[in-house]
Image (tube, helix red, strand yellow):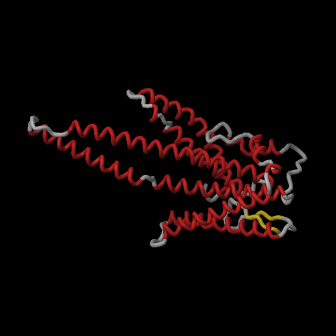
Amino acid sequence: CTANRARKRRNIVHLLHSWRELQPSADYHDHQIFLAKEEKDESLLFNSMGSWTEQWTGRLMSEYLLLGMELDLYAVYEYEAMLWSLDLILKNMRETLLRMQMYEKKLVDKEITELMDEMKLCSPKKEKSSSKKNKSSKELKEKKKRLAQLRASKERKHNVHHDLQSFDMDLYRSMASGILCLLIALRCEGKVKCANLSFGNDETRYAQRVNPLSGIRPEVLHYEVFERISDASKYKAGELLANAETKFANIKHKTSTFLKASFSNRKPSLVEAHHKKKLLALTRVALSNTLAIQSFKASKDVGKLRFECPANSCFPVVSAE
């Protein structure tokens, strides 16, 4: 399935159908769990299973769109809509992950408070018998050990797995929004022509592209929203190019900082080496598109544009013939 990218993309469509049915069930059980609690603390109201399903569907949805880019299924004039959809999905996933982290922190704080209250009650008293005193001391020792573990986890502040997920999402968002700004800027200057379709229109084609992603969270917005956001008359090409350049520079800086901090004194594992390869590919795409922006700024007379994926199979590099 991994080697056959087209088959993987088809399988994702079937998986999304299953996850679409699972999400309402997860939300229902989250609500039932909350109602079953004796103490209904509104501050700890959180859809644990619902958020978990949303994270996984977000991964599948983003992979579906990226595979479409990799398999060259989209026309050049569709890149903007697909990159915008990808950016939106990653943004919602990032927000869900942040809510999950905040919920975990609240749970730890609540458990620490409860343990400290229990430790006060479990303190051995002189009037107790020897056996009861030993049992109380043992319980107190276990609670102190658990309290030390919770405080240590709180001091770490970060879940490494969540941090890595957030890092990747931020990089892919920067890449998608950077290329999106570049494409709109080129359209502002008339270097990318709009579609001239004999049958159908942009809205119909967009609806067909995102149809497998409909009726599921994270929600993909309607074409009217994208049309308003991507309206070239609202923007100046120079500002968009500068914004894209900033996004690409941010990718290069974040990636180089991460790689130096992670692998400066050790050899990466097999999984880490694969991740490192993906990060370096993203950096090459960012650098190539930065060079393209600089050439567009230097010369107004640009020939026919090419969109190729030499470094990363999902994100195109823009160049002039």
Q: Residue at (54%, 66%) from the top-left corner? A: 257
User: Please, is residue 7 above or below residue 306 in the view?
Assistant: above
- Residue that lies at the very extreme toward the right in this rendered image: 198
Q: Is residue 148 left or right of residue 27?
A: left
Q: Residue at (39%, 50%) from the top-left corner? A: 154
The quadrant of the image that shows the N terminus is: bottom right
Q: Position of residue 140 (x, y in %)?
A: 21, 43
Q: Nearer the viewer, residue 210 or 245?
A: 245
User: Please, is residue 265 above or below residue 315 in the view?
Assistant: below
Q: Position of residue 51 (x, y in %)?
A: 53, 40
Q: Nearer the viewer, residue 49 or 186?
A: 186
Q: Residue at (80%, 49%) from the top-left corner? A: 234
Q: Position of residue 128 (x, y in %)?
A: 11, 35
Q: Residue at (49%, 52%) from the top-left corner? A: 162
Q: Position of residue 225 (x, y in %)?
A: 74, 41
Let me know if residue 52 appears in the view.
yes
